[in-house]
Image (tube, rainbow, N blue to C red):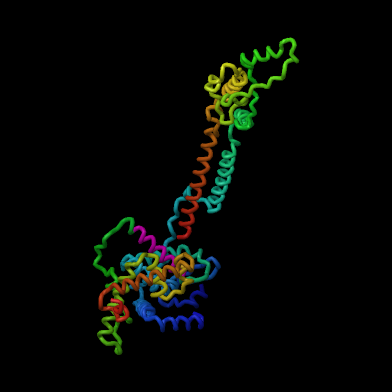
Amino acid sequence: MTAAAQVFNCANHAPLPVHDRAGNDYCYNCVIENFQAPAFGLARRMLNDWAMAEDAVQESFVSGYRAFSQFRGQNIKAWIMRIVANHCRDILRSRRARPTVSLDPLPSGPDDVTPSAAEIPSAQESPEDHAERQELRRAIEAGLAALPAEQKMALVLVDVQGFSYDEVALIMDCSLGTVKSRVSRGRGSMRDYLRATGELLPSQFRQDK
Amino acid sequence: MPPGRRQAVAAALERCQVCRQELDQLAAMLSAMRRLPNGPAPRSFVFAAPPAPAPVARASLFLGAPRWVYAGAVSVAAVLLAAVVSADLTGSLVPQDHAPAMRSFQAAPAPGELAPQETAVPDAGQTQGLMKSAEPGSNGPEPVESPQPEPGIAVPLAPPAQGTPPSSEALETAPPGLTPAPAQETAMNAAAWADEYPSVAEGQATTPLMWRVLEGLLALAALAGLTALAFKMRRERR
């Protein structure tokens, strides 16, 4: 536990010691702090629902805590993201079986994302460029939401979150070739979607129109 | 990308304007995707206290055993099923009282292989000729060739290879001058054969129901084991 406390920074929370299968010690709260942002980002884009994504991430971390003794000590980020991905798959499957309509007024769509530093216009960017970039972002979020679940997951992990193909193969529990295939098909679908989207996108996407 | 291939791609892009547009679109899209907001989580998911351990699920008889148990059960069921089916296909499961019948059935020569062994009694004209040639003063009876049997009246002596006794039509259509004694004997043999092995003669010499049921049960066991194994692997993956 001492080693884990030295590796991670437990200043903001109570230490929560866990041991993996290889006998290594970790602070599970530190693991959560390190990976909760990408985990939530994946869940939000997979589920298109803010509250559901929160629940999925919380349940994933609880599952991870209970199953931590099965972790073999290789790539903890991929292991955590794999649990989140599986939870998202389960939720999507149950949602398909029992479709529901949310009455929650909380933000639940890609347009309701809380503004981040990336969205604040820079001094060098003209208002037109900023508006165009925002429009492209919204179009990409909508295009992502329209993709099949497995292509969406591969595209979010590779192109949005910057995971390597090997890590995505671990997360999605499939072969490297399958990941590449899904990413390629997802990119093609996204490009087609952007071409078919309105006139407000950057000039690259208007040349064919 | 290796340098040589990169140069080849660059040269191809210089020649192809459509390809350049495609690449520009893809690059712009990927750049925009990488700039999508990946902000912090809306709240901290850190645990204030350790989560309660998972509720202990009641041990299930269906999925409670280790994985190797299901794999072994499936393997055993598959091997047994293969053994029973192969024995069935080779006829080893036919009861013993049918075996001699099947042997005699298979040992019977095919109709085309039968030599015409029938002998015919000479008709009246031929008899007179013989009597003439046997009169005193002659050189003695000349050898008389046996008349060849007319086609269509040859009857196999053994039970027919097709498993059916000879038809009575062949016996009835025999010319009156010929003695159908061998054919009658054959018919009687076939009838006796059918009497002795009625189930074989009626085409009922099949695998007993018990073995059929066993084949079905083994197939069901193998299928159930495979299903349990798939469920267990899926549960463990989670």
The extreme top residue here reads B136
- Front residue of this view, candidates B99 and A3: B99
Tell whether position A87 is magenta. Answer: yes
Residue A41 on image: x %, y % = 36, 72
The residue most toward the bottom is A124
**Relative to the observer, which residue lies in front, A188 or B161?**
B161
* Residue A67 visible, this orientation: yes
- Image x and y of residue A140, in percent: 32, 74
Horizontal relation, residue A164 to residue B127: left or right: left
* Closer to us: B121 or A145: B121
Instruction: Report how many numbered discs are placed on residues in the image.
Output: 0
| Magenta segment includes B40 | no
Location of the C terminus of chain A by quadrant is bottom left
Q: For the stretch drawn in magenta, what is the main secondary structure?
A: helix
Task: Answer left or right for A67 relative to B83.
Answer: left
Left or right placement of residue B105 versus residue A86 in this view: right
Looking at the picture, does residue A141 appear above or below residue A132?
above
The furthest residue to the front: B137
Q: In this view, does B61 lie above or below A20?
A: above
Range shown magenta: A78-94
Q: Can residue A27 be seen in this view?
A: no
Closer to the camera in the image, B55 or A83: A83
Q: Which residue is drawn at 44% across and 53% down?
A: B57
Q: Position of residue A100 (x, y in %)?
A: 28, 59
Residue A48 drawn at (x, y percent):
32, 67
Residue B208 in the figure: left or right of residue B135? left
